Structure formats: structure tokens, C-alpha cells
Image (tube, rainbow, N blue to C red):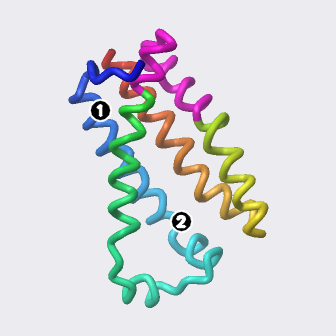
Amino acid sequence: MITFDHNWLALIVAAVVNMAIGAGWYGFFAEPWMEGNGFTREQIEADGDNTPYIFAVANSLVMPFVLSNVMNWAGVSGLVNGLLLGLLMWVGFTALTFASNHAFESRSFKMWGINAGMYMVGLMVIGAILGAWQ
């Protein structure tokens, strides 16, 4: 079922690119994200907890591995097909999960867009990278 026979260079590149997307995304949306969560820049800078970054790195490493397995199972190859599969995985597993969580937490649609949007772009780019390198 799960295979470890992948293009590991593509997986590493996809992971690094996904981390760069996250850094750029939350850099660009820092102010509305902090406002939506009730944080100030001073609070974040004083926190010093690296746990969120550890999870972000782990997430960026696991997502390409899992998506590569799904691509293998589905027989998906090529840049466009990989991009579309990434979009499908986002719609099926991320977008609505985030929407449900945000609704129960009474968080705004804007926060959903910031948080879920990063994963949409990330999964699509990961899929495109993996599809192009298969």
C-alpha cells in the first residue's frame, strides 16, 4: 500500500518549496492573521516557543510523501495533473475541515481564507512538482 519508492529529490524540493510558501504566505498575511487571532507582534516575538515550527517542518515533509503515494495509487503524472490532484486533496481534506473548525471556533471567513488558502497553494505546488518529476 504505502511505498517508499519515490523521487526523493522531488519530495525534498517540494517540502522546501512548501515551507517557503508558508513563510511567504504568513509573512504577507501577518497583520490580518495576528488580528484574527488576537495576537500582537510583541506577544509572538516574546513567546519563544519553537513547537509550531517543528510541526510546520514535519507537515512540509509528510505532505509531499503522502501526496506522492496518492499519485502513485491513482496513476497521476504530469505537472497539470499533479496540480489538479493537489487541489482535489485540498478540497476533500483541508478546505472543509478548516471551514468546520473555523465555524465551531466562531472564526471569520477571512481567517479561513488565510489558513486554508496557504494549504491550497502548497498542495497544488507540491502536486505540480511531484507530477512534473515523475
Magenta segment: does it hold 84? yes
Q: Secondary structure at mark 2?
A: loop
**Residue 19 rendering spot, x and y as whole percentages:** 35, 51
Question: Cβ–Cβ below 8 Å for labels 2 and 1?
Answer: no
* Residue type at the position of mark 2: Phe
Quarter of the image with the N terminus in it: top left
Q: Secondary structure at mark 1?
A: helix
- Name which residue lies at 37% across and 25% down: 130
- Name which residue lies at 25% across and 22% down: 7
Q: Which residues are magenta?
A: 68-89
Quarter of the image with the C terminus in it: top left
Is 39 placed above or below 53 here?
A: below
Residue hosting label 1 = 11
Task: Name the residue at the left extreme.
Answer: 9
* Residue type at the position of mark 1: Leu
Is 46 placed above or below 122 here?
A: below
**Residue 59 rendering spot, x and y as whole percentages:** 40, 49
Task: Tell me the quarter of the picture where residue 125 sits.
Answer: top left
**Magenta residues: mostly which secondary structure?**
helix
73 or 108: nearer the eye?
73
**Residue 118 rendering spot, x and y as whole percentages:** 53, 50
Residue hosting label 2 = 29
Horizontal arrangement in the rendering, residue 62 relative to residue 105 (left or right): left
Counting residues from the start of the chain, the first of labels 2 and 1 encountered is 1
The CA distance from mark 2 to mark 1 is 26 Å
Residue 82 numbered mark, or none: none
Within 10 Å of the Cα at label 1, are there few (<14), some (14-19), or many (20+) other Cα atoms?
Answer: many
131 or 96: nearer the eye?
96
Q: How many numbered circles are shown?
A: 2
- Name which residue lies at 39% across and 85% down: 47
